[in-house]
Amino acid sequence: MEADVLTYLAYGLAIVLNLFILFIGARFLLAPRAAAAGYGVPARENGDPAYLTIKGVRDGTYGVVGLALLAFAGAQAEAWFMLAVALAPLGDTLIVLRHGGSRATAFGVHFATAVVVLLGAGLLFAVR
């Protein structure tokens, strides 16, 4: 019974994380300035909007790849993917800190996300 709970928790967290990053990608595509402000580094009014679109496509792609791995390759492949993709929110933490964003956003959003992604990876590695 405990293995079933672990499996549901691991898969459930992975699905939620992948759907959440899909949502963030869509937000960067549909409301880029608001998404950038939520990211922790507001976009400049006269800045190049292509970079906000790139962020949206990148995040959306991560979500799709994660869901595809989970559905078609299984828990181990998803765990390795999540382990690797945790570099993105760790990098985002540094970006926010280096570009004048708040420490609360850097650590409370981005670093915390990296920790949850790594926890999800660990749970998926534990599923047999």
Image: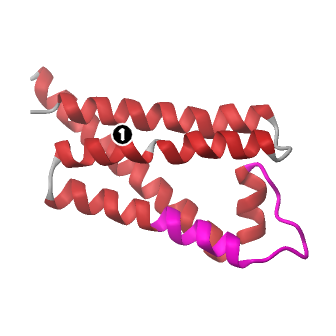
Residue 92 magenta-drawn? no
Which residues fall within the magenta stretch?
A: 40-60
- The answer to whether residue 92 is above or below residue 24 is above
The structure residue drawn at horizontal position 43% and vertical position 38%, both measured from the top left corner, is 117
Q: Is residue 61 left or right of residue 72?
A: right
The structure residue drawn at horizontal position 64% and vertical position 68%, both measured from the top left corner, is 28
Q: Mark 1 points at which residue?
A: 83
The image position of residue 79, as x and y in percent, is 27, 41
- The answer to whether residue 28 is above or below residue 42 is below
Q: Which of 2 and 107 is in front in this view?
A: 107
Q: In this view, does 108 lie to the left or right of 8?
A: right
Colouring convention used in this rendered image of the protein: secondary structure
The image position of residue 40, as x and y in percent, is 76, 48
Residue 52 magenta-drawn? yes
The structure residue drawn at horizontal position 48% and vertical position 54%, both measured from the top left corner, is 20
| Residue that protrudes farthest toward the top in the picture | 2
Q: In which quarter of the image is residue 31?
A: bottom right
Numbered circles on residues, count: 1
- The answer to whether residue 106 is above or below residue 71 is above
The image position of residue 104, as x and y in percent, is 76, 32
Q: In this view, does 68 lie to the left or right of 44?
A: left
Q: Is mark 1 on a helix, strand or loop?
A: helix
Instruction: Check the picture and name the quadrant holding the N terminus.
Output: top left
Instruction: Check the picture and name the quadrant holding the C terminus.
Output: top left
Amino acid type shown at disc 1: Leu
The image position of residue 83, as x and y in percent, is 36, 40
Number of other residues with Cα within 10 Å of mark 1, as a class: few under 14, some 14 to 19, many 20 or more: some
Q: In which quarter of the image is residue 122?
A: top left
The structure residue drawn at horizontal position 79% and vertical position 42%, both measured from the top left corner, is 98
